[in-house]
Amino acid sequence: MAVKEFEKPILKEYSPIPKLVEQATSHLAPFKSKEDFQKSLGYPGELVDNWQEVALGKMGDLLKKYRSLRVYMDSCIQCGACTDKCHYYLGTKDPNNMPVGRQNLMRGVYRKHFTLPGKFFPKLVGAVDLTKEVLDDWYSYYHQCSQCRRCAVFCPIGIDTAEISMAAREIMDSVGVGQKYCNEIIGKVHKIGNNLGLPKPALADTLEGLEEDVEEDIGVDVKFPLDVKGADVLLITPSADFFAEPHVDGLIGYAKVFHQAGISWTLSSHASEAANFGMFIGSYDNMRKLALRIREAALDLGVKRIVFGECGHAWRVAYSFLNTLAGPFDFLDPRYPVPQHICEVTHDLINKNVLQFDKSANDGKIITFHDSCNVARASNMGDIIGGQFSLPRDIIKATTNNFYDMDDETIMEKTFCCGGGGGLLTDDLIELRMKGAQPRMEALKRVVEDHGVTHMAAICAICKSQFSKAFQYYGFELDQIISLHQLVGDALIMNKKEL
Amino acid sequence: MSFVTIFYGISFYVATLILFIGLAYRIYEYSIIPAPLKIPTPPAPKTKKGVAVRLFREVVFFESLFSATKWTWLFGWLFHFALLLAALRHLRYFTDPVWFWVSWEIVQAAGHYAGYMMVFGLIGLLGRRIFVDRVRYISNPSDYLMLILIISIALTGLLMKWFHTDIYAVKMFFVGLMYFQWSELPSDFILLLHLSLVLLLMIIFPYSKLLHAPGLFFSPTRNQPDNARDQRHISDWAKKLESKK
């Protein structure tokens, strides 16, 4: 199945809300998961014969396990407040990409099979049977949601489409219709420990190479320790940080911070992945198993703190779910929150004057900051309300002289997703990804034109990969997307006296 | 006792039972389903007190809707506020003697003019449903009918300004129902139409999207304090996974 050509969106000064175009992206659906990936996660290998019965059973089960799902199925007023809030709707014009349109794909089935009015007056309330066509629509459109929660911020009831698309994906997995990208990756983490399937020797080799590069570059012996027992900090970072660009510059930045602050730290080969794709497929079980690897690594290495690198969804699972999934963490140093974000660590060290910066090192760059959706709308930093917005900005301002925010409607809790989150960062969805990036690209274009912004910093592995592609597509330069901790690493004054 | 009185008397008993038992059952259902994960949306309060403030602001000012779309907010808020004022005015039919503040001129007058405000707000919402392509796309017949039903209730209520009915008799009817000492209901057409539509609304409430009213209070994105790192939050079914190991 080759990816078809598609019309390239034009970036406008101010885009009006597009008129809807029915079925505009009904042709988009990611590759389906193969039998062995499915089975390794405990799902049927292919569509089971009595799939309707199984799917409805699973749905009934989830309605009893997740209050969010049940309340959100019942409570939508169909008021339309969310209809122009999804970047995928703005980019594709497909009404099923309006958050409520997406929700209604499941709500119709819910009404038909779980409510009286839907049973007796299906036409009146838009109730539908779960047919093969409906299942296909689910597969298509529940994989056109990046679970970024922008809609949930605007909904008067707080209905979160992410909760519904997660449930839909779990129902589909339970009947044997899984997504290749997510399920293949989850399988790799269960087996090896990271999304890339990078085994320990390869990881050790990569880190050694980084040590040599940094030493050559700045003449300081910055370590990238792996599986060091008794280290203070266990760093959990997305595996893309080990060699993807611009991610790796972020990893170098964290290492410099730890080095300069004299904090002993280590990576783990057992838990060498921050991202938890179990969340994308709505599977508590898989999410929990992946999270437990972190607990096991922390116990095994005898660390005192757990710190997460720059990764949006990872930070959601870490900040909001880790204590639930793999806690309690009473064996760690109680003086620090569990887990911590690398930005919290750096911010704290800046406040304590442990880190000194030469801002002029970043003078070649004029920076803007992209709030990654899952950091912005599903987590916090610094235990102050809005800390997830202020801490990264404080760090940028401490390390650079030139910073401009994008439009208020496109940052902080109203930030646009990069277009590749929620398990959609796969080339079979490239059309969706590029169209979904449009609102962010438009906001970026404005600060480029108004303030001469040259670089956008981000704190999410998916954002960084997605923007590397989207920047080229929309006529920016590939290297204009950078890791926040690259700014930190480049401006940090390193004490060269040490060995 | 006339047929009309008996019919409406029984209907109001039945509708009241459906409304209150239905709603209580829904609330019970929502309250026993766990929210296994912390999913508050920003700006998320850290404490339960903060959550109370947040919910108050949502319920009273429709804060999220305001940030989403000003027209829907305006029409929706006017309608709901008018509904409250009209409901307060109607308390005089159910309290004997009438609570002192209900009989205040300002409460009664506000309740009357609220009727017009309600119709205005609802027609605005209906207009959005018809003319905004995105809202039209998501509207089912029930969404239009619900608006038309409530508009009709408001209009028949307002019409009684001109088509007078013996409101003291109406009051005695309802007070009689409450204390099981029935009294005759006047059989004026507009009044009966008004009451019939209200009965319909009461009956469909626990089976319809009107559940957004209790739903908001049970919405985890709005009612959870953001304290996942400080307090371990775990549901019963998730706890069972732990003991399995």
Image (cartoon, coloured by chain):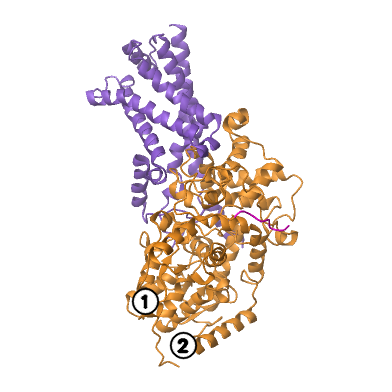
Q: Is residue A24 or residue A493 the one in the foreground?
A: A24
The C terminus of chain A is located in which quarter? bottom left
Chain B: give its colour.
Answer: purple
Q: Which quadrant holds residue B72? A: top left
Report whether residue B230 is seen.
no
What is the drawing colour of chain A?
orange
Where is mark 1, residue-wise? A349
Q: Which of A134 and A258 lies nearest the eye of the viewer? A: A134
**SS for tag 1?**
helix
- Residue B24, image x, y percentages: 46, 34
Q: Are marks 2 and 1 in contact (CB under 8 Å)?
A: no
* Rendered image quadrant of residue A60: top right
Badge 2 marks a residue whose secondary structure is helix
- Which residue occupies the foreground of this view, B120 or A255? B120
Residue A3 colored magenta?
Answer: yes
Is A132 in front, or is A19?
A19
Q: Residue at x 43, y 59 (%)?
A: A446
Q: Give whichever of discs 2 and 1 has the lower sequence position.
A: 2
Q: Which residues are magenta?
A: A1-7
**Residue B186 appears left or right of B242:** left
Chain identifier of the residue bearing label 2 in the image = A
Quadrant where the N terminus of chain A lies? bottom right
